[in-house]
Image: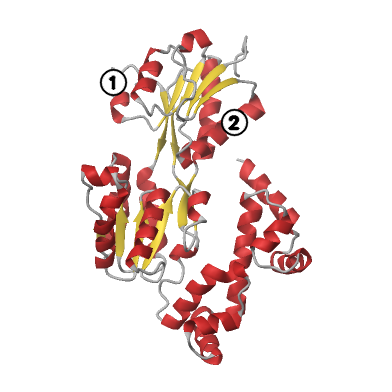
């Protein structure tokens, strides 16, 4: 049983919120505090000009949880004689004798991420594969690519690995773009490509657009982290691997609580890895050979929520309506109108899950004439009202 606390814990949370995994971890920690607190918190997000905690002892710090992502934070944590749970610490901190080596850690299983990506694409029957790592070539990125390539090669296929960047290219995306575009053009098509992280995946998709390469027609792109802001706003929306970082940080906060209560002194390693692939259009329909259908799908993806109809699609592909409908149904098993509605409803669901926009506003954004019409279509398709759907998804994302 946990021992009783004599005062409210004062915990420093060190998580750079520019990183999606860190934002998920902050959410997990705050959920633990909400349910089992109170804790006094000082959250360091990595913003310019934010208040630091240089003198942890004077602040009354009783625990630290997070990433030591600057030399200053390493020094501060090293001097602090309090329980700590460190997120993805560098290997040097884990060597025997280092002042931080005895602390508990939360560590990513980056190898499992690469394996899940490979299995996802292998199940979709690709024969060409590629990997683009993080620009600075960090160890976790290299391992992710090696794991991806190992699974692919074991299945009998080759994997093309994008080479290391020069210092100038690491600092300037504009200097890298021509090289990246040339490499993407040179890949055998269609190819299944894993990007080390979502931001890199978005960069690849922008390069594909610049180079005239179709996504997903020529290159299917899969990112990692499932940063909705990045994934939902690419063209087309980008598939990504969701990590179970929120669960891991909740568990880490729970363990830090035990450490602060002196209920345990054991060092613990908490692993977070891939939870699931969130599939979007960037990995769909790549194997469709009919160029008329591919062009129709690209046009629908871009314009479905702008009020287009079937004649607009037919005019774009420059074929007869009858021929287009026949070829569309042969390739996808449903009509052009059904595809337009599917894309619209996919967008409705995304906005219901991930925003607090009023339903009336969502109606207009997604190309429906009235909220009542959308309500009827939604209930027929999903068996619930939009409000009930939104409520149930918000509840699911807050549970562990």
Please name whichever residue, 367 or 153, is drawn nearer the observer in this view of the structure.
Answer: 367
Q: Quadrant of the N terminus?
A: top right
Q: How many marks?
A: 2
First of labels 1, 2 by sequence position: 2
Question: Do we see residue 133 in this rendering?
Answer: no
Left or right of residue 153, residue 229 in this image: right
Please name whichever residue, 360 or 82, is drawn nearer the observer in this view of the structure.
Answer: 360
- Residue located beneath label 1 in the image: 96
Residue 242 pos. (x, y %): 48, 49
- SS class, disc 2: helix
Write the residue at 51% across / 37% down. Answer: 23
Residue 198 pos. (x, y %): 42, 50
Residue 45 pos. (x, y %): 48, 30
Kindly report the distance in space between the C-alpha atoms of the residues bearing marks 1 and 2: 32 Å
Left or right of residue 332, residue 136 in this image: left
Residue 30: which disc? 2
- SS class, disc 1: loop
């Amino acid at each position: 049983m946990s021992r009783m606390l004599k005062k409210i814990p004062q915990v420093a949370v060190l998580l750079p919120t520019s990183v999606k995994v860190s934002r998920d971890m902050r959410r997990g920690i705050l959920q633990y505090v909400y349910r089992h607190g109170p804790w006094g918190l000082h959250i360091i997000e990595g913003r310019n000009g934010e208040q630091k905690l240089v003198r942890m002892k004077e602040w009354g710090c009783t625990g630290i949880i997070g990433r030591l992502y600057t030399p200053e934070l390493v020094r501060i944590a090293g001097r602090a004689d309090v329980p700590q749970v460190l997120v993805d610490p560098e290997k040097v901190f884990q060597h025997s004798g280092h002042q931080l080596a005895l602390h508990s850690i939360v560590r990513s299983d980056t190898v499992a991420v690469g394996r899940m990506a490979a299995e996802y694409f292998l199940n979709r029957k690709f024969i060409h594969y590629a990997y683009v790592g993080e620009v600075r070539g960090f160890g976790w990125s290299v391992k992710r690519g090696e794991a991806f390539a190992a699974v692919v090669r074991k299945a009998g296929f080759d994997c093309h690995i994008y080479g290391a960047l020069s210092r100038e290219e690491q600092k300037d995306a504009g200097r890298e773009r021509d090289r990246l575009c040339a490499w993407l053009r040179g890949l055998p098509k269609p190819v299944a490509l894993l990007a080390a992280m979502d931001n890199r995946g978005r960069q690849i998709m922008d390069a594909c657009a610049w180079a005239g390469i179709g996504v997903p027609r020529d290159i299917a792109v899969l990112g990692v982290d499932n940063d909705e802001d990045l994934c939902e706003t690419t063209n087309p929306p980008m598939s990504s691997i969701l990590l179970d970082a929120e669960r891991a940080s909740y568990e880490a906060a729970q363990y830090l609580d035990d450490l602060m209560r002196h209920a345990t002194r054991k060092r613990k390693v908490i692993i977070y890895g891939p939870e699931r692939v969130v599939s979007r259009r960037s990995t769909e329909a790549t194997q469709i050979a009919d160029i008329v259908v591919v062009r129709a799908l690209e046009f629908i993806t871009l314009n479905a929520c702008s009020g287009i109809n079937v004649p607009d699609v037919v005019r774009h592909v420059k074929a007869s309506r009858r021929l287009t409908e026949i070829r569309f149904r042969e390739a996808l098993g449903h009509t052009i109108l059904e595809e337009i509605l599917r894309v619209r409803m996919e967008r409705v669901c995304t906005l219901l899950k991930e925003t607090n926009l009023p339903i009336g506003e969502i109606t207009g954004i997604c190309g429906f004439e009235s909220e009542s019409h959308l309500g009827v279509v939604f209930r027929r398709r999903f068996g619930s009202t939009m409000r009930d759907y939104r409520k149930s998804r918000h509840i699911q994302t807050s549970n562990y």
